[in-house]
Amino acid sequence: MSEIIEKEDIGVGRACRVINLTRSMWYYCSTKDDSEVEDKLHTFSELLPTKGFWEYYGRIRNEGLVWNHKRVKRVYDKMGLNIRRKKKRRLPLREKHPLQVPERMNETWSMDFMHDSLESGRKFRTFNVIDDFNRESLAIEVDTSLSGERVVRVLEETISWRGKPNKIRVDNGPEFISSAFVGFCEREHISIDYIQPGKPMQNGYIERFNKTFRTDVLDAYTFKLLDEVREIKAHWQKDYNELHPHQSLGGLSPCAYSKKQLLIEENSLSLSRNSSHSA
């Protein structure tokens, strides 16, 4: 109504008659003190930025406060909290762990994602899993979308034939900090070794694997369909595990290195038993 008074240069009484408003309503000033409600809602908006009114109101009632939900909603709207806000979570600090060669199979797995596109321009991703012990490729999942739930599904399938790792090394991607992945590792008692943000070489084994996969497959072929990617990666994965020589493994392939280490362990165990018997 202030705009009408200023624009038309008329008095308050006439302006009230024009819009059918009593003078008492125009001069009325609320004496309600909502500062306590505002403070409470401000606290919740800082602690729980992704939640909404009913989450806040439920917590208010659980604290024993008996404010009417209409009053709380009025203050909530007045503060602009009904406008959805996006606030990124801050990553927890990550400790740097040295990249060590595991002494046995399934001690540490490394995982990472790669990106490429089909001839049509459609993007796709690959989810790669290796065993750090012998650099063996355990899984390469290919699809246009790979969520945290899909990561868990691939891990469950891999564990069913390979066994469970003690530790998994990953970066801070959304799939690896998702509740699906973290919850799965907690249930299976698998520790997660997060590398520091912006330090990919702390996950050097999978980075080296990705480079080879990129050179031999993703950069070597053009693909029309995802099935073509899956078919070629399956042949490559078998060749990589069984025949590809690694300098870090003494020129042996991942499978050959595993067999050699297993034979060494068996011979060592046999010698130990013979020594104990002769003693």
Image (cartoon, helix red, strand yellow):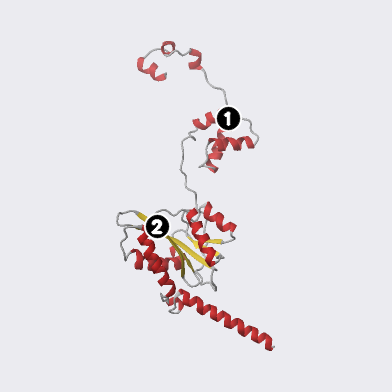
Q: Amino acid at mark 2?
A: Arg
Residue at the spot 65% in from the left edge and 86% down from the top edge? 275
Q: Which mark is residue 153?
A: none
Q: Which mark is residue 125?
A: 2
Residue at the spot 65% in from the left edge and 83% down from the top edge? 273
Position of residue 256 measured from the top left corner of the image (x, y, whole percent): 47, 77
Position of residue 187 measured from the top left corner of the image (x, y, whole percent): 59, 57
Q: Are marks 1 and 2 in contact (CB under 8 Å)?
A: no
Between residue 247 and residue 95, name the one nearer to us: 247
**How far is the residue under mark 1 from the one under mark 2?**
47 Å
- Label 1 Cα crowd, 10 Å radius (few <14 / some 14-19 / many 20+): some
Position of residue 174 measured from the top left corner of the image (x, y, whole percent): 47, 53
265 vs 175, left or right, is right
Give the residue number, with chain letter if any, for mark 1.
Answer: 69
Helix, strand, or loop for circle 2? strand
Q: Amino acid at mark 1?
A: His
Between residue 4 and residue 99, name the one nearer to us: 99
Eye-nearest disc, 1 or 2: 2
